[in-house]
Image (tube, grey):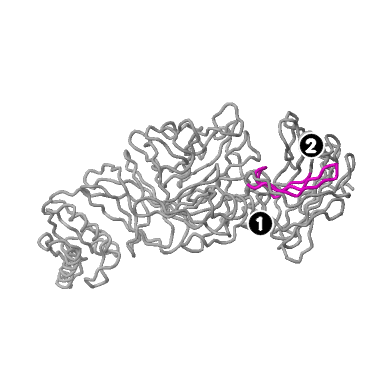
Amino acid sequence: MKYSIWIVFLFASALASAQSRIHYIDNFENNNNGWTLMNDDGGTAKIGGGTYTISCGSKFISYRFWKPIVIDANNDFSIEVRMKHIEGPNDKMFGVTWGTDDWKNSHSFNISSSGKYKIWRYHNEKEIVSGQGVSKAISGRGGANVFKIAKDGANVNFYINGNLVFTDSFRAFYGTNTGFMVESGVKVEVDYIIVKHPEIKINLVTEEISKYSKENMGEGINGKYSEIAPVIAPDGKTLYIARNVKTDYTGYNSDYEIMYSTQKPDGSWTPMKNIGAPLNNAKDNVVIAVTPDNNTLLLEGLYNADGSHKSDQGISVSHRTETGWSVPKQVVIDDYYNRDVYESFCPTTDRKVLVMSVERDEGFGEKDMYVSFLKEDGTYSKPKNMGPVINSFDNEGTPYIAPDGVTMYFYSYTQPGFGSADIFVSKRLDDTWTNWSTPKNLGTKINTNDWDVYYAVSAKGDYAYLSSTRGSVGNEDIFRIKLLDAEKPEPVVLIEGKVLDKKTNKPIGTNIKYENATTGKTEGYARANPTTGEYKIILPYGVKYQIFAEKEEYFALTEELDLIKVLEYKEVKKNLLMAPIEKEETILLQNVHFYATKALLTLESHGELNRLAETMKSHPTMVIEIHGHTESTPGFEDQLMKLSERRTESVKAYLENKGIAPERIKGKAFGGTKPVADNTTDEGRQKNRRVEFLILSK
């Protein structure tokens, strides 16, 4: 009986008692489903006339012909294959392979035309035989044999031509590949393959698939070989990729170089440019993250002091300097190791958390997702497995943490999907980074039955960028897709501006820090461009922030930003001013506040006063005079003068409590006699309620 070729990935909930249905079927009328075709000394494989004819040549002991077919191994399932031995020795074997990663980690059910059967697997290249013997049910050469592997609860039954030949306990899968195996010199014809199990529910991110389709970014971005690992700067204006630059692409041991493109005012992109040394060297070079200011890059691999390749394992950091990018330096992760050849990483925007895809001894499968946390000494903690909701028996990888610090995108071979590697999204549920929402598939506008990985989103959330083989010019290409609101991460705010000298208005290249204004907790760091002073920061909602720059011989005027109320994505322009520490310089403490009509400092004032105390400790001869000001209200001059006196004393007392000697702190109250703004408006009166300090001696 012939079957029409069709693949169904059903969307109804799977029930334990549900009757198994056809999940995958192929009768090889054509090769729409992408089976291997070949004709060389490794073997032959062709499709036509309703058969898949395959053989293993003299180059190999055996050969496996497979493709990704996702089987839900948590439920009962069956794999049925009919094949016929047409050429080769009767004692050589052929059969079915499933739940397979590669030959090193594979399951097989084989027979020979001499009547023998073998149920066995490779695990890390070690052969493990579950059962073997002789069966009269096996047809000899030229006769058809129907294989059936059927999981029933905790057991798996193996049938030949309807006869049970062996029962084994269920063994966990190594991967998602299913197909056929033949030993050297053997040629077989495969008539069909049928996979059955209860319906698989693909948990989509939205019930209605996005109305937008992903678009190939074109020849300016993509070449004739491979482009992978797109990293979009949070402002959406610089795109970094890794391009295979070998002229003879083989797909193995390929050398990737970092390329970048910038967005033009009309929205188009410049042709890719090579970022050059020291970021590119003779081995694979890949950007894994860029800070919002576009002044710091995290890179895969380790570098020597001269920029040459040191190791493929681990990550490094490079900063933009006045003369170009610095030689990358190793980012230290406690007890870091990876059993796999490949690895992938992504930090949060503030770099306080590092997520990685690596294979470690405590994993659930092959490459799992792990998390490390930034320590006070600048290193990261020992990787911690992120748990079974995210991780499975197979590979999970290319993590991307959105700027909101909550939404994670990653690929999985095991989560119910459309074939091969699909991209999923999950939300972090607490601060342990091991508690996640059930991953959701991004749908058929993103995922195909080919390789879909490396998903990244700009801070605005308007576009996502990914690497895919489907519809590519070369091997892998870079694509982008416009996102609906339901598909976007949580909204954030992009802060941008310049760090400037308050007196000269000249740019300053230095470090920037942002804190929780209520708790004083450091939320992250940024770097201003060493030439232009430009900076950019991404801030999630839910916190009131204080932002300031740090540089010796300067005191920063702190900017406060209230993002407690969650709204929508927006961009804020805010320059950060730095006052030079010089005699006779008057500096505004613009985030020192008091409760209404009182001299009691608010909690938000402590951070700035703490910085003033630290500045005075680093300048032990410095003497200052605190100036207290209020608004001006006719008839209340005396009360306001006394209020400014009490507030001045509160600031002095705070600094003394932080270890500053009383003789180094003078005080003067001005009440409302020195306004800097119009007292007839609320905004003006707010500006007039201020505290300043005058540097009397340095």
Residue 236 x %, y %: 48, 45
Residue 658 x %, y %: 20, 63
Residue 399 x %, y %: 53, 50
Query: Which residue range is magenta in the image?
Result: 95-123
Residue 33: image quadrant is: top right
Residue toward you, 240 or 87: 87
Circle 2 residue? 54
User: Disc 2 vs disc 1: Cβ atoms closer than 8 Å?
Assistant: no
Q: Which residue is drawn at 47% across and 56% down?
A: 404
In reply to whether residue 120 is colored magenta, the answer given is yes
Q: What distance separates the C-alpha of mark 2 from that of mark 1?
A: 41 Å
Tell me which amino acid carries mark 2. Ile
Type of secondary structure dominating the magenta stretch: strand
At mark 2, the secondary structure is strand
Residue toward you, 483 or 446: 446
Q: Is residue 444 shown left or right of residue 485?
A: right
Q: Is residue 273 above or below residue 290?
A: above
Tell me which amino acid carries mark 1. Glu
User: For the residue carrying disc 2, how many other residues have a C-alpha within 10 Å: few (<14), some (14-19), or many (20+)?
Assistant: many
Q: In this view, does 67 lie above or below 353?
A: above
User: For the residue carrying disc 1, how many other residues have a C-alpha within 10 Å: few (<14), some (14-19), or many (20+)?
Assistant: few
At mark 1, the secondary structure is loop
Of all residues shown, which one is farthest toward the top? 247
Circle 1 residue? 208
Residue 143 x %, y %: 90, 42
Residue 685: image quadrant is: bottom left
Q: Which numbered disc flags the more N-terminal residue, 2 or 1?
A: 2
Q: Residue at x 76, y 35 (%)?
A: 184
Indicate which label's residue lies in the foreground, 2 or 1: 2
Q: Is residue 556 above or below residue 637?
A: above
Q: Is residue 678 shown left or right of residue 108?
A: left
